[in-house]
């Protein structure tokens, strides 16, 4: 029997134990002044309107306007993204970007790669929104610029600079209570800030009887999070030196069958640090040199299980303005990553060195991007990837774009070395990287001064897909996947009323077994409407609709495919501006108290509320 993707293992084999660059460091003042500018798609600051990729930029204002309870909820509202989570706050999250697997999206924090070397993915559950200033989502492969993992795209998160002080306090349903604060100082060209926060959620039972006897436990499963952020920067001549650091320390309760004498809990600690030197070296030459480090520790005492991974990287990127119409980016990278697991495999490590070049230019109404990268991995030898894009500004209001790109992903340490789970789901040290080719056509239309519309159609083909196949369900490069999709985005602004939305149609399937890839809806719709009643009061309404999604039922042998029903959900928001600095926010989620399922056997929140008091200094 063959299963179509690695997500099954996350629940069947690993979840029980762990349920749980080249870009410069970004600064808070950059996020405020860049506006509709991105740096992730091209590794250079460029207006989104000129970028030949499908890009979404979420600013701090967008984050606050959404009143999303966590990062996963915010990302689930974006075009091309599906989120599956094993319960409530803090539960393990899987993000599917354009229908690809959860380890096919490269995640960056302040330019530092944070995908786990053991699991291959990044768990968004523990990164608080209060620590985030800006999010850039680039859909489509970016391996020619960023290397491994960027098969479905790249999500880069820029942390918040607390030198502008703030305080946020909130209470809500399921015993939610939390507070975040930041404070700092600014003296001339130098600034320093520190931010901290904590949150506790009593929660609800993450599982129901459909999870099976060995998982279901009807008790409430709580979540606790403590976090600390540091920002500092100063000017050294023509150069800027900046440091960012982020620490999150979380405790996640999960269900592990009938009541146990010890708590079923995972302690998850994540650390990200970056030091960057950037600036102009001449009138046509700028650069950034970044040293980064990230690590993850997962400890589950109930199973005497500990997972850990770490990565240290050094990146140097140079931008050369050849002339007013042509720009050349040249970059090199070195990284070393390690992973270990108590009782599973000893410490493993590997190194990667890479170089890339990217050329961007425009002439008349035409623009283009060409990029090429070579990665030399101590374990998998070489991988060369390319990307090409072309744009045609048909008129002032209409632009057509086309792109072609390659991607690859090196197997994570669990896929390589994890021992068999009761003789099944074992790793395979002979695995080779997954590889992909993607094609995309897009149309950007500014209908008038109040409306704009975007359309993207794509096909992504992945070969050597890592699945767990054969009599013992061992990790193997035996599958091929094809993902076809169309994304539509729309925005409208008139006076005090605004409307935004996105719709996604996708067909993500295993070409060998002819089965759909798990937990990805074929159709998805998000709509948000906001209206400012007066200077003091604003109201908002969010709507989400998802079609049925495939999943697997592990309570029968052999496991069988099932369909999770589609659903629609409505959330209401209100903001009352008490003063210029103080605001009171209220959110009512799942107004209709709709029952829905994201993963078989795991519960989702019912009707719930969140009340937030926010102060922002100047």
Image (cartoon, rainbow, N blue to C red):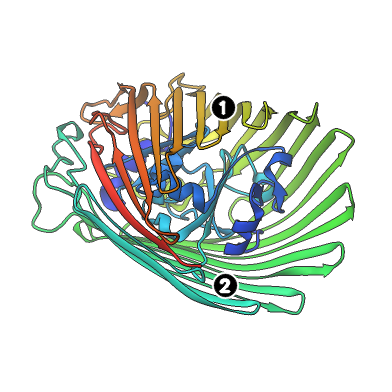
Q: Residues within 10 Å of mark 1 (few under 14, many from 20)?
A: many
Q: Quadrant of residue 313?
A: bottom right
Foreground of the two, 190 or 284? 190
Kindly state the secondary structure of the residue where label 1 is placed. Answer: strand
* Residue at image mark 1: 487
**Position of 510 relative to 8 (above/below):** above
- Image quarter where the N terminus lies is top left
Question: Which mark identifies residue 243?
Answer: 2
Task: Provide residue 451's location: percent of width, then percent of height.
Answer: 62, 29
Q: Is residue 273 left or right of residue 384?
A: left
Q: Is residue 248 left or right of residue 293?
A: left
Determine the residue positioned at 52% across, 62% down. Answer: 337
Determine the residue positioned at 61% across, 63% down. Answer: 29
Q: Residues within 10 Å of mark 2 (few under 14, many from 20)?
A: many
Q: Is residue 213 left or right of residue 603?
A: left
Instruction: Decide which of tag 1 and tag 2 comes sooner along the chain.
Output: 2
**Position of 273 relative to 599 (above/below):** below
**Position of 533 relative to 564 (above/below):** below
């Amino acid at each position: 029997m063959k299963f179509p993707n690695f997500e099954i293992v996350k629940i069947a084999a690993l979840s029980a134990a762990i349920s749980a660059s080249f870009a410069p460091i970004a600064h808070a003042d950059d996020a405020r002044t860049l506006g509709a500018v991105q740096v992730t798609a091209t590794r250079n600051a460029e207006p989104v309107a000129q970028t030949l990729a499908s890009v979404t930029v979420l600013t701090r204002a967008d984050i606050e306007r959404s009143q999303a309870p966590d990062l996963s909820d915010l990302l689930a509202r974006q075009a091309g993204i599906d989120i599956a989570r094993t319960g409530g706050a803090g539960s393990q999250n899987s993000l599917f970007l354009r229908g690809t697997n959860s380890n096919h999206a490269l995640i960056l924090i302040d330019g530092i790669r944070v995908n786990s070397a053991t699991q291959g993915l990044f768990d968004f559950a523990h990164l608080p929104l209060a620590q985030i200033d800006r999010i850039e989502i680039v859909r489509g492969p970016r391996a020619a610029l960023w290397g491994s993992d960027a098969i479905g795209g790249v999500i880069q998160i820029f942390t918040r600079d607390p030198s502008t002080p703030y305080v946020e306090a909130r209470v809500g349903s399921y015993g939610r209570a939390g507070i975040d604060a930041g404070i700092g100082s600014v003296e001339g060209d130098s600034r320093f800030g520190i931010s901290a926060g904590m949150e506790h959620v009593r929660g609800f039972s993450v599982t129901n009887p459909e999870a099976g006897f060995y998982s279901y436990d009807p008790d409430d499963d709580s979540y606790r999070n403590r976090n600390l952020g540091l920002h500092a920067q100063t000017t050294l001549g023509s150069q800027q030196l900046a440091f960012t650091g982020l620490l999150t320390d979380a405790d996640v309760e999960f269900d592990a069958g009938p009541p146990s004498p010890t708590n079923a809990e995972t302690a998850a600690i994540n650390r990200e640090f970056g030091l960057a030197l950037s600036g102009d070296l001449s009138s046509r030459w700028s650069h950034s040199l970044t040293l980064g480090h990230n690590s993850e520790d997962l400890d589950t005492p109930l199973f005497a299980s500990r997972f850990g991974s770490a990565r240290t990287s050094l990146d140097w990127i140079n931008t050369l303005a050849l002339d007013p119409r042509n720009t050349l980016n040249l970059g090199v990278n070195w990284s070393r990553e390690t992973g270990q697991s108590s009782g599973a495999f000893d410490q493993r490590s590997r190194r990667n060195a890479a170089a890339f070049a990217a050329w961007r230019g425009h002439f008349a109404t035409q623009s283009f991007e060409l990029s090429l990268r070579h990665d030399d991995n101590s374990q998998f030898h070489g991988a060369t990837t390319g990307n090409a894009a072309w744009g045609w500004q048909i008129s002032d209001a209409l632009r057509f774009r086309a792109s072609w790109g390659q991607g690859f992903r090196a197997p994570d340490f669990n896929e390589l070395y994890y021992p068999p789970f009761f003789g099944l789901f074992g790793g395979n040290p002979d695995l080779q990287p997954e590889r992909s080719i993607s094609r995309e056509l897009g149309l950007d239309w500014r209908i008038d001064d109040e409306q704009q519309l975007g359309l993207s159609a794509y096909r992504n083909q992945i070969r050597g897909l890592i699945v767990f196949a054969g009599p013992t369900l061992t990790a193997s490069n035996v599958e091929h996947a094809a993902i076809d999709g169309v994304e539509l985005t729309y925005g409208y602004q008139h006076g005090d009323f605004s409307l935004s939305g996105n719709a996604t149609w996708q067909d993500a399937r295993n070409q060998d077994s002819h089965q759909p890839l798990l937990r990805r809806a074929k159709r998805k719709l998000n709509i948000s409407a906001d209206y400012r009643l007066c200077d003091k009061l604003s109201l908002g309404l969010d709507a989400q609709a998802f079609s049925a999604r495939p999943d697997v039922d592990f309570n029968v042998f052999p496991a069988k495919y099932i369909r999770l029903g589609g659903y629609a959900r409505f959330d209401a928001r209100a903001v009352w501006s008490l003063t210029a600095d103080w605001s009171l926010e209220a959110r009512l989620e799942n107004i209709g108290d709709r029952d829905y399922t994201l993963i078989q056997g795991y519960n989702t929140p019912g009707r719930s509320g969140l009340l937030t008091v926010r102060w922002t200094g100047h």
